[in-house]
Amino acid sequence: MTAFRRGVRLGIDVGRARVGVARCDPDGMLATPVETVPRDDRSIARVREIAVELEAVEILVGLPLNLRGEDTPSTADARAFAAAVAQTIATPVRLVDERLSTVSAHAALRNSGRSQKSSRTIVDQVAAVVLLQQALEVEKSTGRPPGSPVPPVQETT
């Protein structure tokens, strides 16, 4: 195993209607669902509250690229959401490739016997778990933080 930066991380799956939030334990062994946050004027503030409450050392926001690795309208939305989170908190924010995390989440829920309709309220949390678990595995296998940093807001004088 390579060097792993210890600490709780949040995984964020940004959707148009809801934002899924997951967390991991300080050793990065297991990602678990936390909450589905309604996508409204309080979304950013609620993600910040969760990060502070859980003493997160990093926030990983899923970047929904298409299968060719290109941006989509959802990619721009996720980038804007990540930038808004980075403006409100000193905790580092990173964008991580989350291709197929929602597809994987739907498949996992279907395999557990849940219909797509009955899964609507938790699929975003499960997608956040999937993207966070993948990011943890990347860091553990490479020794490098996953994804790319979202620059913190620069103070203007």
Image (cartoon, rainbow, N blue to C red):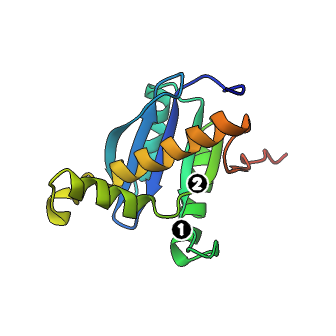
Screen quadrant of the N terminus: top right
Which amino acid type is marked by label 2?
Ala
Q: Position of residue 67 (x, y in %)?
A: 56, 74
Name the residue at 54% across, 22% down: 27
| SS category of the residue bearing label 2 | helix
| SS category of the residue bearing label 1 | helix
Quarter location, residue 63:
bottom right
Quarter location, residue 57:
top right
Horizontal relation, residue 134 to residue 17: left or right: right
Q: Which of marks 2 and 1 precedes in the sequence?
A: 1
Q: Position of residue 55 (x, y in %)?
A: 51, 24
Screen quadrant of the C terminus: top right
Q: Position of residue 62 (x, y in %)?
A: 53, 55
- Few, some or many residues within 10 Å of mark 1 (<14, 14–19, 20+): some
Q: Is residue 92 above or below residue 95?
A: above
The residues bearing labels 1 and 2 have C-alpha atoms spaced at a distance of 9 Å
Residue ID for mark 2: 82
Q: Foreground: 140 or 45?
A: 140
Q: Foreground: 49 or 55?
A: 55
Q: Is residue 134 above or below residue 98?
A: above
Horizontal relation, residue 33 to residue 114: left or right: right
Residue ID for mark 1: 77
Which amino acid type is marked by label 1?
Asp
- Few, some or many residues within 10 Å of mark 2 (<14, 14–19, 20+): many
Q: Position of residue 87 (x, y in %)?
A: 63, 47
